Amino acid sequence: MRAAIYNGPRSIEVGERPDPVVAAPTDAVVRVVLGCVCGSDLWYYRGETPHAVGSIGHEFIGVVEGIGTDVRGIAVGDLVIAPFKYCDGTCPHCRAGVTSQCVAGGAFGNGEIDGGQGEAVRVPLAGATLVPVPGSRHSDEMMRSFLALSDVMSTGHHAAVSAGVRSGSVVAVVGDGAVGLCAVLAAHRLGAARIIALSRHPARQEVARSFGATDIRAERGDAAIGAILELTDGVGVDAALECVGTGQSMATALGIARPGSVVGVVGVPHDIENPMETVIFRNIGLRGGVSPARAYIPELLDDVLDGRINPGRVFDFETDLDHIAEAYKAMDERRAIKSLIRIGAKEDGR
Amino acid sequence: MRAAIYNGPRSIEVGERPDPVVAAPTDAVVRVVLGCVCGSDLWYYRGETPHAVGSIGHEFIGVVEGIGTDVRGIAVGDLVIAPFKYCDGTCPHCRAGVTSQCVAGGAFGNGEIDGGQGEAVRVPLAGATLVPVPGSRHSDEMMRSFLALSDVMSTGHHAAVSAGVRSGSVVAVVGDGAVGLCAVLAAHRLGAARIIALSRHPARQEVARSFGATDIRAERGDAAIGAILELTDGVGVDAALECVGTGQSMATALGIARPGSVVGVVGVPHDIENPMETVIFRNIGLRGGVSPARAYIPELLDDVLDGRINPGRVFDFETDLDHIAEAYKAMDERRAIKSLIRIGAKEDGR
């Protein structure tokens, strides 16, 4: 099969990889329909974090092409959403809903197992991992939203849930990448009364507004803290959602969080200062981490199918597998919020 | 009046201080019956953190001797519990239950206002701050438990509440000081099914058992992590309560917390490593900080009055104001869990 291959910083090429096969009775082989590029893929693309040379991409939807004898709950021909990590569904962490910490789990496209930026993927523990999509002949718009559940919408939702967003909450989202925008949508879905999005990029501001942001602020750093404290009568927000992972974004999130609140943190941390003094002396909690996407997808999928949320709007650039290098480049240069890759034909899905 | 005075590291003396008076209409003057020494007092006693030279101590119970014209809810002659910080009860943080972050609040014995280790204290914002104790002629045992609500029991409770301890939880408490022991009691009160106390000190182990600890482990550091993971089938505990604040104790708490859980952190931080990688990659939350004691005291007081909890058991050393230097010394040398100071006559309380 053909798949995107990481050769080193700023070098993504399409090459040949072995066709995946059902190797264990719990495996499935999924032919990929749509894949995409994650903001976290840019870390290795830019050479800022290491990554094994090889197959990449951890977000995809596709059609089941083959299953092992022990796979339950999915069938050949099903359209399925893959959460970005596979899991067994039975370990203590999975049973507690923290599927991202499954003792038997792992990540797609990590150099050891196929990524989603290729024509097909062997999915371990497929019955517990893959979420079948009911119905057939879904619109392209809906297909894009299914793809968003694989990671970015589930991660934005995790930020909101971790911070305890609920009906009436005053929320601020730090980060206008696809995860931050999805965090806006997640906060709106959970009933937040006011959602302040930090963004200085017109196209992203527009998506934020369409996702439910009530206020947009273009300031950064201390100016952003001052602006949001002013908006909240000096109190701070009930829930700050940190969706970037840099020192500045974290400092902003901690600075706008009201005492007693929990900052929802889902950005991969880079150069973040030790937050313990804030945790203790300002009574600001921290919670989040790697989203247990598998646990969240079913409820989010219901809302996508009913048309209540449309997270696929974060995809504002698209290409095919042959041109995937362009998809990385567009995100690296911030021309794209998130790049979608069309890989297989959707019509084959039921 | 006579009061303990901090003159510098390891120098606590009893001297004369101006008699407190009602200076604002919201003030009360409280004649102190019982005061005590806090584990956090040892930081300045040992010269490890700075402290203004002057009156000290932030935990006390006493009898109201005078009140300003705007004080509601308490009367002259009432026996009252002072939370370790005063607060106005009306600011947004107080209304949200985070009284420790009151915009008009402050701490007793901080060098600017009287401490509780003296004969009397001017209490600002007294109507919102002080909690009157109903009834009269309370036993000495009960008086000691009232005093424990001023800080140490409210702080242990805050650790447990922040970590989400509930019926059936598996809890571990890192730290066998008075706060850690009270955290055991708080976890027991909240219905924890299993409470593992880390302690290698026989007298503290005994108090921990009497407070509800089901398991005692003497290991420290990596050995403690290994032992507790073994006790929990490799999963970790539902709630780790960090009641020390050192790098080692925090590392232990993070190491034994199960993914998805929240570590309750109430130790004043000293040399703690940046926990962000753990927060993100192991899905471990952090929450706690300065206890909003004022918000917790009423419910805890009900349980003390009904005999359901007896947090005063943490006081295992006592003396009078003249010998307060001995009270510090006993705690500094770990001969005492917590030192009680008898200052006034309890009979004068109603």
Image (cartoon, coloured by chain):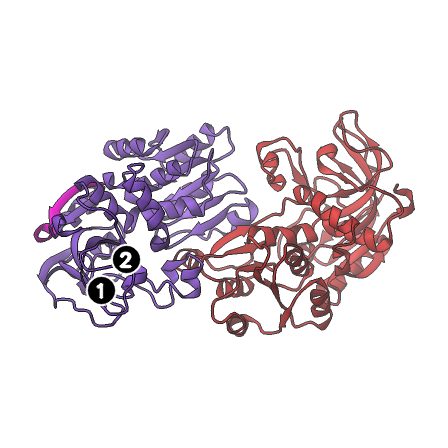
Chain colours: A purple, B red
Q: Is residue A319 magenta?
A: yes
Give the mark nearer the N terminus: 2 vs 1. Answer: 1
| Chain bearing mark 2 | A
| Chain bearing mark 1 | A
Q: Label 1 sits on what residue type?
A: Ala
Say which of A207 and A263 sits in front. Answer: A207
Instruction: Locate the N terminus of chain A by quadrant.
Output: bottom left
Task: Give the overall secondary structure of the magenta segment.
Answer: strand
Quadrant of the rendered image containing residue A210: top left
Q: What is the residue that sits farthest to the right in this orientation? A: B347
Q: Is residue B128 left or right of residue A44?
A: right
- Contact check, label 2 and label 1, Cβ < 8 Å: yes
Q: Position of residue A88 (x, y in %)?
A: 34, 65
Q: Residue sitting at 60 percent across and 47 percent down?
A: B290
Quadrant of the rendered image containing residue A170: top left
Total number of numbered labels?
Answer: 2
Q: Position of residue A315 (x, y in %)?
A: 21, 42
Task: Determine the secondary structure under disc 2.
Answer: loop
Q: Is residue A333 magenta?
A: no
Task: Determine the secondary structure under disc 1.
Answer: strand
Q: Label 2 sits on what residue type?
A: Leu
Q: Residue sitting at 83 percent across and 56 percent down?
A: B141
Q: Position of residue A160 (x, y in %)?
A: 41, 43
Q: Position of residue A349 (x, y in %)?
A: 16, 51
Q: Residues within 10 Å of mark 2 (few under 14, many from 20)?
A: many
**Disc assigned to residue A28:** 1
Extent of the magenta region: A315-324
Q: Residue sitting at 43 percent across and 56 percent down?
A: B279
**Disc assigned to residue A130:** 2
Residue A225, above or below A8: above
